[in-house]
Amino acid sequence: MSSQINAAHKSPTILSFLRRAQEFAVLAYAISLPISLTLTWIVFIVGLILWSLELLLSFVLKDLSTVGGAKLPSLTIPMLLFAVAVVLSCVFNSGENPGSIGGSALKDGWAGLYSLKNILPYFWASHVFGRNKDLAKSALAFLLWTSSIAGLYAAFQQIFDFHPGTFRYLQGTGFHGHPMAFAGQMQIFSLFALGLLLSGGYKKIAVLPAVRQLRPFLQLTKKTPVFIALAICNFAGLFFAGERSAWLGGFVGVLALAGALSWQLIIPAIALMALGGAVAWFAFPLLRTRIGQLFSGHDVSISARLVIWNACLKDHYPNSPCFGVGWLKFPHFDIKEAIVPGVSKDLNHGHSNYVHILTTTGIVGLLAYINLLIWIAFGALNKLRNALAGKDRFCAGVAIAIFASNVAMASSGVFEFNFGTAQVRLAQWFLFSLL
């Protein structure tokens, strides 16, 4: 009898430990995002194991706060619809010909579903943040400090031509090995920094008792000059990554953020970005070089995209317009001048979210993807309206950051398959869990 009583007392303690451990895992995950894809995956797997143990123990103890009291995250339906479109594209392309079902339908369908594992942090983070609202404030503080360091490092790499990786890029890559992945992340991080800055939400950012030992450090984040510096460092990372599609995304994202706050801010935003662009034009050769390549008439990145898009839209998509050629069966292109030595062997994505998704999942998948973008946009604007009504500056900053990031990724996604970049998805869906 006494052993049963002891077990009853210990179980809640274990459950509390699992929940607390997940909070630290979330903080570690946020710090790892700008640093290492491998480290991010390790932390996430640990968090996933802790979450699974918590759910299992909660079910055994019939703890309704975990088992029955939790709500589904706001993006569950559109994400589920897109997942269904991906699975269907795999099932209907499991045969020998595009659009046909074969004997490996179940296996291929599961493979397609498994390939979407990079969006799982959305559900994990939604669960942990939903239980501890203040955790997001500390997580964002740690993330923006780390990403600002990555931004400064990218500036150093580009200005001093320091590239420790296997290929000497013209651009900075931060702590990642590729400028495209780094630029994709910095679009999101810089817009989150700007959103919190303009809303004043950064002043509410450091309140989590779990990291009280680091509280003096986090208090710096609430100082206006310090946070302005963090925002500048993040935008420096976006600039020195040198990806023109990311520049476009950042430009449109800033306009979206300004417009969401007030239409009157759009013209000043354009003026400030024009002034910054003019200064950068004369101060940094990177901008002149990248823009010059665009209008040179022999830009490899443009010619490669045209080859891929033309082949996808004329040769591959028409073979299976409804469900595409299969989510995992995008054709590979051997364009030697566009291949990075030691990094890639061929081009295996559409260099566009829309072309890639249309080709692989057909019109069904493209509509599901656009529906997801629209759902995020309206959800963010609704959250912003509620936050402003409740005078919650932190939630307002998060809401406009999510809205702007969504617009930025959708815009740059015209020319990049950032939806398929692991580092970008792991960051994007983690932060979008705050919706």
Image: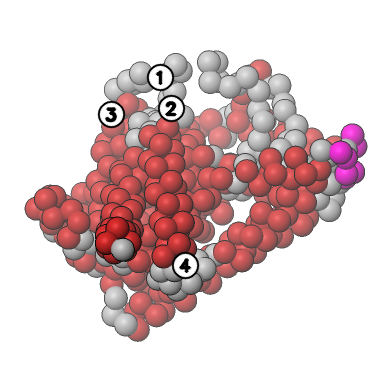
Figure colour scheme: secondary structure
Q: Dot 1: within a 10 Å radius of its alpha carbon, few (fewer than 14), some, or many (20 or more) residues?
A: some
Point out the stretch of residues depicted in magenta: 96-103
Q: Residue furthest bottom?
A: 389
Q: Which residue is mark 2?
A: 177
Disc 2 + disc 3, Cβ < 8 Å: no
Q: Dot 2: within a 10 Å radius of its alpha carbon, few (fewer than 14), some, or many (20 or more) residues?
A: some
- Nearer to us in this view, 288 or 371: 371
Q: Which residue is mark 4?
A: 67
Going from N to C along the chain, the mark reached first, 1 or 3, is: 3
Disc 1 + disc 3, Cβ < 8 Å: no
Q: Nearer the viewer, mark 1 or mark 4?
A: 4
Going from N to C along the chain, the mark reached first, 1 or 4, is: 4
What is the spatial separation of the Cα atoms under label 1 and label 3, in whole angstroms?
A: 14 Å
What residue do we see at 86% from left, 38% from top? 103
What is the spatial separation of the Cα atoms under label 4 and label 3, in whole angstroms?
A: 49 Å
Q: In the image, residue 199 lies at what x, y percent?
A: 29, 68
Q: Dot 4: within a 10 Å radius of its alpha carbon, few (fewer than 14), some, or many (20 or more) residues?
A: some
Q: In the image, residue 342 lies at what x, y percent?
A: 53, 15
Q: Which residue is mark 1?
A: 165
What is the spatial separation of the Cα atoms under label 2 and label 3, in whole angstroms?
A: 15 Å
Amino acid at the residue labelled 2:
Gly
Q: Nearer the viewer, mark 2 or mark 3?
A: 2
Q: Nearer the viewer, mark 2 or mark 4?
A: 4
- The reply, left or right, for residue 345 in relation to residue 72 is right
Amino acid at the residue labelled 3:
Phe
Is residue 370 something that shows in the picture? Answer: no
Is residue 106 something that shows in the picture? Answer: yes
Q: Which residue is mark 3?
A: 156
Q: In the image, residue 198 lies at what x, y percent?
A: 29, 65
